[in-house]
Structure formats: structure tokens, C-alpha cells
Amino acid sequence: MVLPHPYFRGKELVPSEGTDPNFLRREERTWGFVSGGRYGMDHPFINPLALPAAEWAKLGCRRALVTVAELDAMRDRGRRYVEAPRGSAWAGVEAALYETEGERHVYFIDKSAGAGEKAKREMAAVVSFIEQQG
């Protein structure tokens, strides 16, 4: 499984999101719109870390790569996603993190020259992860 810059949120702020309660309110409004108001901020669709540890064992893969960017407010949630399976019932899991310095969320869709080289390196890391025999 490869999760490039996953869009994870939750009811409690994490360090990379700051401490501004207005940030959380904006994110709650956005998620409410996206989910049609059906799911709260701690629903596993937006916050997989809300799943009980036993649920992680039901994931249909043994290896996971999460990519994040240094300037992404969701960076710490991606990092935590990599750590969560290690402490769960998901036995034998390989969870890896790839972080791009000096970039923001989904920078790789930017057509500027600076983002292009970093995007190529990130894609190479993704390809390498997929090609690994594990």
C-alpha cells in the first residue's frame, strides 16, 4: 500500500497543525462538506488512527509506505500512521515513511521546476518500495 500525502484529520490537533482553534473549525466544515455531514472528524474515513489496534490486522496488505512533506499541516498524522501499525495486532507489517523537505501538501502536482526534481525523487522512492520483495 502506498499513501502519497494522505488526507488525515482528527478532532484533536497535532503539532504540525498548530494550536489555532479556528484551523480545526475550518477543517471540520470542510470534512462536513466532503462527507455530506455523515461522519465526524474522528471517523476512520478521515482519522484511521481512531481505529482500535485490533482493526489494523484486517488491512489487506503487509507493507505500507506513507509520503509526507515537511511543510504540510497533515505531516504528523502521516508520521503517526506509520507508527500505529507497529504497535497493533498487524503482525509482521513493514511501514515506511518518506518525507520531502521544504515542500507542502501534494507539492508534486505543482509544475514549477523546483518541485519537479523533488517529485522525481519521491516517485523513485515509491517505485523502489513497490519493487522490493518483502
Image (spheres, grey):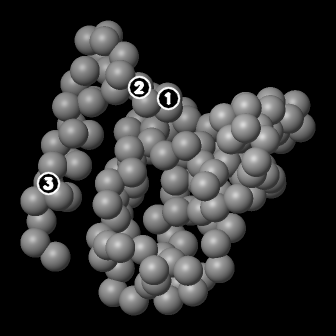
Residue 41 in sight here: no
As displayed, is residue 85 above or below residue 98?
below
Q: Which residue is drawn at 22% across and 25% down?
A: 117
Q: Left or right: where does residue 134 sit relative to residue 112? A: left
Q: How many marks?
A: 3
Residue visible at 70% across and 59% down in the picture: 43
In the rendering, at what x and y percent does residue 70 appear?
Answer: 49, 38
Label 1 crowd (10 A; few <14 / some 14-19 / many >=20): some
Instruction: Assess whether mark 1 and mark 2 are in contact (beta carbons under 8 angstroms).
Output: yes
Residue closest to the eye, 77 or 101 = 77
Image position, residue 107 (x, y; %):
41, 25
Instruction: Name the spot of residue 2 as percent of width and height, x first.
Output: 32, 54
Q: Helix, strand, or loop for circle 2? A: helix
CA separation in Å, label 3 and label 2 = 20 Å
CA distance for labels 1 and 3: 23 Å
Give the residue type at disc 1: Arg
Which residue position holds label 1? 104
In the image, what residue occupies the spot 27% across and 30% down? Answer: 119
Q: Which of marks 1 and 3 is nearer the N terminus?
A: 1
Answer with left or right where residue 22 lies relative to residue 65. Answer: right
Disc sitting over residue 107 in the figure = 2
Q: What residue type is labelled 3?
A: Ser
Considering only vertical position in the picture, is 22 above or below 37?
A: above
Residue with the mark numbered 3:
128
* Left or right for 67, reference 55: left
Q: What residue type is labelled 2?
A: Tyr
Q: Which residue lies furthest to the right in this view?
A: 21
The answer to whether the residues at label 1 and label 3 have Cβ atoms under 8 Å apart is no
Mark 3 falls on what kind of element? helix
Circle 1: element type:
loop
